[in-house]
Image: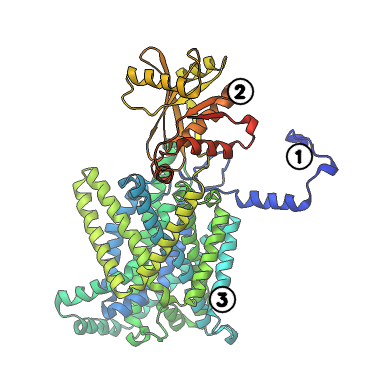
Amino acid sequence: MSHTQASGRTPLPEEAQPPLGPLVRQGLGRWMMANQVQPPGPLASDEHPHSTQSWWKVMCLTGVDYFSSLSYLPGIAALAAGALSPIATLLIVGLTLLGMLPMYRRVAVESPHGQGSVAMLERLLPFWRGKVFVLAVLGFVVTSWLVTITLSAADASVHLIENPYTPDAFHGKNVLITVILLLILGFVFLLGFNEAVVVAIPLVALFLALNATVVVVGILHIVAQPELIAGWTDALRVQGAGPGGLVGPAIIAFPLLVLGLSGFETGVSMMPLIKTSGATAEEQLRTRVRNTKLLLTTAAGIMSVYLIATSLITTLIIPADAFAKGGPANGRALAYLAHDLLGEGFGSVYDLSSVLILWFAGASAMAGLINIVPRYLPAYGMAPEWGKAVRPVVLVYTALSIIVTLAFRADVNAQAGAYATGILVMMFSGAFAVTVSARRRRARKATVGFAVLTLVLLYALVANVVEKPDGIVISGLFILGIVVISVVSRLSRAFELRVTDVELDRTAQLFLRDAARRTIRLVANEPNARDMHEYVEKRRESIRDYGLDDNDDIIFVEITVTDPSAFASRLDVQGHVMHGQFRVLTMEGTNVPNALAALVLHVRDVTKRRPHLYLEWTEGNPVANLARFLFLGLGEVAPTTREVLRRAEPRRDERPYVHTA
């Protein structure tokens, strides 16, 4: 049996077949829009049984960013803190296990669909204030993750070029190599998330195994040469006098090392990709939260062990001047040890592993961008509908990554300020959100602990902005771009029919079924006192202004605007008999014209009759009334409702009637 026979479709005759070009375009369009990131987050379903992965596999995808920081963090710590590098690293490990891990475990509980700490912040501020605040935070999120993509790819090109076996033809081609790496990364994500996970697993396994080898050999080297320990302790006595002298420089170096914690927010954002179990949606959600906590805890534990071990061996073995700018260990301390302790062959394998995981570290950031930003902007009406689809978004981010790379000439140091600013703002806002959440839950110990964490991250953020103010400028440009695009998109989509569903209760159904036997007349009424006098007067005005007869049936429609900043909404229509004689349909919506248009279209579809809708012209300045509609959901109801209906139903003979007076 052919596919068309099995599906019940009748094939077109040969002369009616569309040309190949449109078919190709339609197929490409379907493929581009196939994978959607819905605002609630995609849950495992019968339709997409392979859309989720085991938690440890997702950990590898988030870990390519988190674990790849081993390529540069030990060098940064040694350069910033000198002999105190292990102590500064211990501070980071303490912050990880006692602060960041509990914080993001809490974020996982409160945003189980992958919205992350941004969703918690959104709930703190209602209406437009919340939307504007989220747009600003998203600007920093985009900054941090987009620059993570470009910086990691640029760093990968550096590791590739500095390998002794790399041909001379590659030298000076950092920009070209970085762009090629970005294009390959984008291609992987065009194939899908599963393909990205498949690539991430062996990269993480190989990188961690090679680092474990370097750590073990490094520790054996230190044990065989105890004078290294003596030299380190002498350096500690010279660099720091007393406990204050030891801890002080470590605290000063601390903000630079916080950047290694960027993987936590990404881990939470990818919660929808984690496989669940359970018979009900509630059970599945609980297992998703539990597995996410397991992911975060395992990643933090692995990274903490590696950070302490690598910081110790690099500080004790590598000469201090080798960490300086231009030195052989600058930005690649473990790669230096891999070559020095295990030979050029092993060192080259380590370099290749570093190149691959740094390149694919952008995959973690790309996955975070795909899972976070499309959950907000399209839901706010501040992005086109294709903004919910994975593949178009991947193309946009890949193009932006290439633009950033060209602008910074693939210079890792030039991008460091923006990278740090975005990550620190993201972590600070998350800490602030969980602090407020703990306070509202009256969890006193948690409130104090998270408040301290918030202050620590604020210190790191301020120190970074003072040291590298260009980061806040670049983040500001991203925020400005998001705000401009969002406003333009919102205005261009203002007249869309954006009601997701209309549900009539039993009384409302009875009203419409009875009216459908004659003529369905719906009169919009702005509810005030809702007393007997209001409805009597409104009926009298309707008969006078619209030329109705005393015997005509009238059903009043009343809409209460809830959150005008929201874009789409569902209409739950309830029927009431007011004062024993007036039939009234009541509902809540994000704006009046959209709710009225959706209602009359639904009534038409249910009753198979074209209803008549009666509206009053809005008094006052039309420009001011249009602004009220755009931002408050009120004003210019009559012409706006008519325009929404015209766009939703282009066939005039099928469109509900609209009368104005």
Is 283 situated above or below 363? above
Neighbours of disc 2 within 10 Å: few (<14), some (14-19), many (20+): few
Residue under pointer 1 = 3
Mark 3 secondary-structure assignment? helix
Q: 530 left or right of 192?
A: left
Asked whether 445 or 386 is in front, the reply is 386
Q: Which of these two is toward me, 349 or 95?
A: 95
Q: CA–CA distance between discs 3 and 1? A: 45 Å
Disc 2 target residue = 608
Look at discs 1 and 2 and give the one toward the viewer.
Answer: 2
Local SS, label 2: loop
Q: In 3D space, how far apart are the residues under numbered discs 1 and 2 (Cα atoms)?
A: 35 Å
Q: Residues within 10 Å of mark 3 (few under 14, many from 20)?
A: many
**Mark 1 neighbour class, 10 Å CA radius: few under 14, some 14 to 19, many 20 or more:** few
Q: Residue at x 34, y 49 (%)?
A: 130
Helix, strand or loop status at disc 1: helix
Asked whether the residues under the numbered discs 3 and 2 touch, taking CB atoms below 8 Å apart as contact, a structural biologist would say no
Q: Amino acid at mark 2?
A: Lys
CA gap, disc 3 to disc 2?
62 Å
Kindly identify the residue that appears in the image at 44 percent across and 49 percent down: 376
Say if residue 298 shows up in the picture.
no
Q: Amino acid at mark 3?
A: Ile
Is disc 1 in contact with disc 2, using a CB cutoff of under 8 Å? no
* Front residue of this view, candidates 636 and 489: 636
620 left or right of 394?
A: left
Spot occupied by residue 144 in the image (x, y as percentages of width and height): 41, 64
Q: How is the image coloured?
A: rainbow
Examine the rendering and report whether any part of residue 610 can be seen.
yes
Which of marks 1 and 3 precedes in the sequence? 1
Residue linked to disc 3? 177
